[in-house]
Amino acid sequence: MFSLIRSNVRSLNSIRRTALTLAFFAASATSATSQAETFRGIDVKREGKGPAMIFIPGLNSSRATFTDTCAEFKAQYTCILLTLPGFAGQPPLKEVDAGFLVPMRDAILAYIAEQKIQQPVLVGHSLGGALALMIAEEAPTVPKALVIVDSLPFFSAIQNPQATSLSVTPMAESMKKQMLEQPLEQYQKTAAQMAVMGMSNQPARRATIVEWSQTSDRATTTQAMFELMTTDLRERVGTVKTPTLVLGAWAAYKSFGSTEESTKAIYVGQYQKLKGVKIEMSDSAYHFISWDDPKWLSAQVQSFLKTLPKAQSK
């Protein structure tokens, strides 16, 4: 979770953009026991019983992002907790520079098909939220519902809603080149500094985030960030028909002048094409809402799932 690696960040808006960049870069299963496996490079752990709830973590993150959330739901759902290749110690894809987001979307869909999972609930944090949206766009009948945790359809447009994939590509390419060419020691030092900016309001959790940043594959992190910076889903979410709950965070950016209202307005603007989307904001959480405001997150998800048509719950 590295944001802009450039050393010439001077303005308040640039600093805020840096923090937000970091943030935006995470048949019914019936097994009642914990199971672990690997599928197309994705580390998969299953636990609980009932219909499936698939948890997709964010940039550089482990499935441990959602361990506590799973504990709240595993009596009713089979939690399928993923760690994506190249993140948090997982071996990377062999040709990650050829693409990351689309291969991950397709791999998750292939896993769902192979395991014959019927209408899973997809819970995606940050990068994982982008993947959940991409899955629902690609295969509208697959997910029963989406829970998007602190993720936007186009994070490069946080400061400038007029930004496009084309307009931000030069900056993204420059960032990618610099990250790949930076000496390893400096890269890891910068990664450690940037990994905790606006991520969690709990000091003990920040150490975990730093560890994940240090054990993630540099090429994977760089490619994933490049794709997130240049992937604009704002129009594409208009094709998503899946019931969607979006949970946002703003408290980390109070010192930069952000308010709940101003931050929610960004979410509303970016998700305006997604019909029926429900957007809620945590009062206190930083980016890792599942750690910082776990009871609120679980309550929001429970309440949302109860609103789904019964036919979709079968």
Image: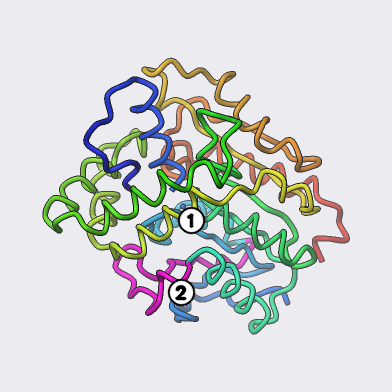
Helix, strand or loop at mark 1: helix
- In the picture as drawn, the residue positioned furthest to the left comes out as 185
Image position of 301 with respect to 19: above or below: below
Q: Amino acid at mark 2?
A: Ile
Image position of 190 with respect to 211: above or below: above
What percent of the width, then of the height, locates residue 181? 21, 58
Q: Nearer the viewer, residue 107 or 171?
A: 171
What percent of the width, then of the height, locates residue 98? 45, 72
In percent of the image, x 55 and y 46: which residue is there?
A: 166
Marker count (numbered): 2
In percent of the image, x 67 and y 46: which residue is there?
A: 302
Crowd around label 1: few <14 · some 14–19 · many ≥20 (10 Å): some
Distance (Cα) linking label 2 and label 1: 19 Å
The magenta region covers: 76-99
- In the picture as drawn, the residue positioned furthest to the top comes out as 257
As drawn, the label of residue 227 is: 1
In percent of the image, x 43 and y 58: which residue is there?
A: 224
Q: Nearer the viewer, residue 287 or 169?
A: 169
N-terminal of the pair, mark 2 or mark 1, is 2
In percent of the image, x 24 and y 31: which residue is there?
A: 8
Question: Is 33 part of what is drawn in magenta?
Answer: no
What percent of the width, then of the height, locates residue 289? 47, 40
